[in-house]
Image: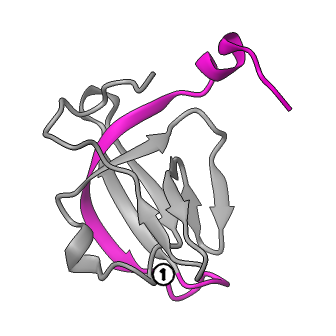
Amino acid sequence: MQITYEDFEKVDIRVGKVIKVEEFTKARKPAYKLWIDFGDLGIKKSSAQITKLYNPNDIVNQFILAVINFPPRQIADFMSEVLVLGVVLDDGGVALIQPDRDVPLGKRIL
């Protein structure tokens, strides 16, 4: 199914920096709780199923891309506010999508 450019523009993808990571033991599938700094947009939380390829210490201070305009989603006892973007690999691992250089936090992706 094709979408229009106007459809794509509705998806608000921004650059953030992970500032805190915790293991999410109450999630049904292995996941981490992430706190992500989006600059002027503030700090947002996300549940991310990225445990196969990353340890918590590997992710802190990493830039990520996330959709910030989906409605918040309750996952166990945690409210996930943004969707972190990654590439799903054949083995089920998820590789984070990241900018290739330092960029200002909160900048929009087009």
From the viewer's perspective, tell me whether residue 110 is left or right of residue 37: right
Location of residue 32 with respect to 66 vertically, above or below: below
Q: Residue furthest top?
A: 6
Q: Which residues are magenta?
A: 1-30
Q: Position of residue 105 (x, y in %)?
A: 23, 34
- Name which residue type carries label 1: Phe
Q: Is residue 100 magenta?
A: no
Q: Is residue 27 magenta?
A: yes
The residue pinned by badge 1 equals: 24
Q: Position of residue 1 (x, y in %)?
A: 86, 32
Q: Quadrant of the C terminus?
A: top left
Kindly indicate the quadrant of the structure image that contains residue 95: bottom left
Q: Residue furthest left?
A: 102
Q: Residues within 10 Å of mark 1 (few under 14, many from 20)?
A: many
Q: Residue at x 43, y 55 (%)?
A: 45
Kindly indicate the quadrant of the structure image that contains residue 10: top right
Kindly indicate the quadrant of the structure image that contains residue 104: top left
Q: Secondary structure at mark 1?
A: loop
From the viewer's perspective, tell me whether residue 74 is left or right of residue 34: right
